[in-house]
Image: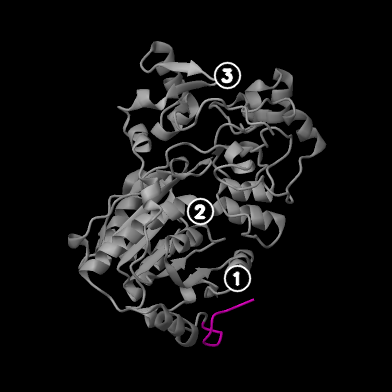
């Protein structure tokens, strides 16, 4: 397909994308242009765009203009730094950390389809299939530099008065904390949804802070990273928690990754260019029922239910039509020249529709994967629903890679202060020979 963009994306940013990186409303950035707060123009696609140089006083834009992305790509590990990943899923976070230079000693995942995905793409990785509750991590105490995991955010209990480790029992965060206690890595990272910041009026995060302190680690002030800032064509946000062991923390400084110099779009994801060397490969995908297809065929690119004829919208939405709120996820068609909305575990859910921008169908498996910046050679296993779920739950690879490079810089600094002779081969052998992954299985990694 012909690329209709005539405005250089490194020089201009759309009002919509500006709103996304600032966390403000589209209406606000539109008004800035209309009122002359910042000069704007209209591109050949009819979008309101700003010259980025005119936005230099906005910190997020200034960071993009002064990006150190290319320099950070050259970060190399001083030695083999070992890592463990929990709740590994389909491997988005693990792959990003691997690209940054970490040597995975062990990955744990309970979902059978996701385990197949990990094993088939990286047969050299030690994949522990099973319930994290059944894993004793103590055999690798002192052998692992870094631990990471996107722990599922389950309900927390506040029965205790101190809000410490005991108050998280029964949650999967407790299992991550237990792994940290048993392994004693130099640094660990947790990632979660943005909503964890404000969950239960901030008390959940306060409990987590207390647990991290109780474990003997110093928490870097948590930060929500917007994936669109890190060469990901998707409006996804993840809360990143990074903690450094107390004996190390006073002597080093962690720096967050520099953003990329422009916003990637679905055009970048689906067509040959800067993000991928070829157009998106053909793959299987869900299909709409004929009735739904007829409705969505009436929605223009970038539109939603508000673009439907009133009677069609009323019939399609049912009672939701009369409820408050924008409901902009309903009958939503994506825009080729904008990033995707945050992917869900299914591309065709009525409340969070992700219709292809120029074809009336859901996104395919490979389109989903490219939006999450998985390489085309990374294959997914299980049913079609399993594959969508794995991709939708993943950390975008490019985001993970960017964070991984920052953590690798930190480890290089730590290694300058405390040269370590910890050995990847030694840790790998311990995992393979001394760790009974499940109580009812022999002392070896459970494999399909």
- Mark 1 element type: helix
Question: Which residue is denoted by mark 2 in the rendering?
Answer: 397
Q: Which residues are magenta?
A: 439-448
Location of residue 329 in the rendering, given as x and y in whole percent from the top left corner: 59, 34
Question: Which residue is denoted by mark 1 in the rendering?
Answer: 119
Q: Is residue 234 left or right of residue 335?
A: left
Viewer-nearest residue: 205 or 161 = 205
- Mark 2 element type: helix
Q: Quadrant of residue 427?
A: bottom left
**Discs 1, 2 touching: Cβ within 8 Å:** no
Q: Which mark is residue 297?
A: none
Looking at the magenta stretch, what is its main secondary structure? loop
Q: Residues within 10 Å of mark 1 (few under 14, many from 20)?
A: some
Q: Is residue 164 visible?
A: no
Viewer-nearest residue: 83 or 347 = 83
Residue at point 69% right, 26% down? 299
Location of residue 416 in the rendering, given as x and y in whole percent from the top left corner: 23, 67
Q: Quadrant of residue 230?
A: top left
**Discs 3, 2 touching: Cβ within 8 Å:** no
Disc on the earlier residue, 1 or 2: 1
Disc on the earlier residue, 3 or 2: 3
Q: Is residue 430 left or right of residue 341?
A: left
Q: Residues within 10 Å of mark 3 (few under 14, many from 20)?
A: few
Q: Is residue 433 visible?
A: yes
Q: Residues within 10 Å of mark 2 (few under 14, many from 20)?
A: many
Question: Which residue is denoted by mark 3 in the rendering?
Answer: 46
Single out the mark in the foreground, 1 or 3: 3
Measure how far apart labels 3 and 2 are at the Cα level.
Answer: 32 Å
Measure how far apart labels 1 and 2 are at the Cα level.
Answer: 17 Å
Quarter occupied by the N terminus: top right
């Amino acid at each position: 397909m012909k690329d209709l963009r005539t405005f250089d994306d490194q020089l201009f940013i759309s009002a919509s994308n500006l709103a996304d990186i600032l966390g403000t409303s589209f209406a606000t950035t539109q008004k800035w242009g209309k009122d002359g707060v910042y000069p704007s123009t209209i591109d050949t696609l009819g979008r309101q765009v700003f010259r980025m140089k005119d936005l230099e006083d906005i910190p997020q834009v200034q960071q993009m203009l002064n990006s150190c992305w290319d320099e950070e790509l050259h970060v190399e590990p001083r030695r083999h730094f070992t890592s463990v990943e929990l709740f590994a899923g389909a491997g988005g976070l693990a792959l990003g950390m691997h690209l940054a230079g970490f040597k995975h000693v062990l990955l744990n995942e309970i979902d059978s389809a996701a385990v197949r995905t990990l094993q088939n793409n990286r047969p050299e990785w030690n994949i522990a299939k099973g319930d994290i509750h059944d894993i004793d991590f103590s055999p690798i105490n002192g052998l692992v530099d870094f631990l990471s995991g996107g722990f599922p955010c389950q309900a927390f209990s506040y029965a205790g008065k101190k809000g410490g480790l005991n108050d998280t029992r029964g949650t999967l965060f407790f299992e991550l904390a237990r792994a940290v206690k048993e392994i004693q890595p130099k640094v660990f990272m947790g990632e979660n949804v943005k909503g964890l910041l404000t969950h239960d009026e901030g008390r959940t995060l306060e409990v987590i802070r207390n647990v991290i302190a109780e474990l003997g680690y110093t928490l870097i002030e948590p930060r929500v990273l917007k994936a669109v800032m890190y060469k990901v064509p998707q409006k996804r946000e993840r809360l990143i928690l990074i903690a450094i062991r107390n004996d190390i923390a006073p002597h080093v400084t962690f720096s967050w990754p520099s953003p990329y110099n422009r916003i990637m779009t679905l055009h970048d994801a689906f067509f040959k260019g800067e993000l991928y060397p070829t157009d998106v490969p053909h793959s299987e995908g869900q299909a709409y029922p004929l009735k739904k297809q007829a409705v969505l065929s009436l929605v223009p690119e970038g539109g939603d239910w508000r673009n439907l004829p009133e009677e069609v919208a009323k019939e399609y939405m049912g009672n939701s039509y009369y409820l408050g709120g924008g409901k902009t996820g309903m009958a939503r068609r994506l825009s080729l020249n904008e990033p995707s909305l945050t992917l869900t575990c299914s591309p065709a859910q009525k409340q969070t529709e992700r219709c292809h921008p120029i074809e009336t169908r859901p996104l395919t498996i490979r389109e989903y994967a490219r939006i999450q910046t998985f390489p085309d050679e990374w294959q997914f296993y299980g049913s079609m629903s399993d594959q969508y779920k794995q991709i939708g739950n993943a950390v975008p690879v490019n985001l993970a890679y960017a964070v991984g490079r920052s953590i690798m810089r930190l480890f290089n600094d730590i290694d300058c202060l405390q040269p370590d002779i910890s050995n990847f081969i030694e840790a790998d052998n311990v995992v393979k020979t001394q760790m009974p992954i499940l109580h009812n299985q022999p002392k070896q990694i459970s494999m399909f």
